[in-house]
Amino acid sequence: MDTAIQAMNETIQPVPHIEKQVEPVVQAEGIHLAFGGQRVLDDVFFELPAGGAVLLRGDNGSGKTTLLNVLSGFIHPERGKVRMCLNGRSLNAPHTSPERLARAGLGRLWQDIRLFPTMTVMENVLAATAGMAGINPFFALAAWPLVRRQEKAAQDRALANLELVGMANRANSSGDKLSVGQMKRVAIARLLQAGAELLLLDEPLAGLDEGSAQGLIKLLNELNEQQGKALLVVEHQHERMAPVCNRTWYLANGKLITEGMPA
């Protein structure tokens, strides 16, 4: 019997470990877009890995913000494909509404931060909570215990997100009583509340003093390294983003250079 077991063990080979491939959070293939005959995006190809942090550079008018608009569903390219994998869901970005992309896990930080000025910081963040049963009047009345549980969970998550961005101590402050740097932190907390896994950041350092800029850089680095958020950043102060972004892309004449930098 022992001899038979030994012979069987010798014939059984261990199953090799196959490492699971991580799907890129964004894949763009042949994106082309022109305005008035002028090519803005010309056969743009790229892959943004999950958890990656990329600085998107280019001269003024090179199409950086336009590319962000395409990725976030506000502009449809003339041709090309954009495929996203957010929170385990696959979507085709050019044919998906901005609202659906946001619900799936795409967050956009605009240059113009617009908080609700008459609402508190906490209320501004809670406004981004998706799937609340209390939004439906029927559920608000018929399933009151469920609504209360959801509200409590949303408040706990909002407070945790405010703690993460360093704004928990201003949770009850009015939205119109914040500095530009504080407003940007609240806007990021709002994206996190909505479940964002990919953050598109358009000039996040614009309008910030030195202290606020350093604090925001530290926050973005933590979101990428500790929270695993993927970042695509447009920022003219590109040298300051070195602690955050581990690669640089360059957009010029509609072409996107993802390897190396132009002279």
Image (spheres, rainbow, N blue to C red):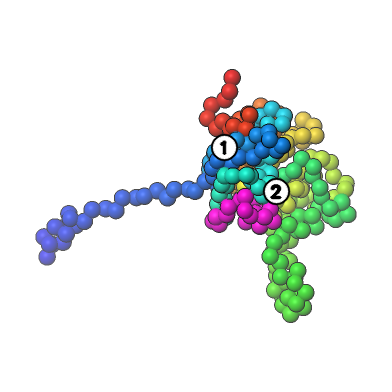
- CB atoms of marks 1 and 2 within 8 Å: no
In the image, the segment drawn in magenta is: 88-106
Residue 235 point in image, percent of width and height: 69, 33
> At 66% across and 57% down in the image, what residue appears?
100
Amino acid, disc 2: Phe
Label 1: how many residues lie within 10 Å, few (<14), some (14-19) or many (20+)?
some
Q: Secondary structure at mark 1?
A: strand
Mark whose residue sits in front, 1 or 2: 1
Q: Secondary structure at mark 2?
A: loop
> At 85% across and 44% down in the image, what residue appears?
178
Residue denoted by label 2: 74
> At 75% across and 77% down in the image, what residue appears?
138
Q: Would you place residue 139 above or below residue 46 in this image?
A: below
Residue 85 point in image, percent of width and height: 55, 52
Residue denoted by label 1: 43
Residue 179 point in image, percent of width and height: 84, 41
* 113 on left or right of 26: right
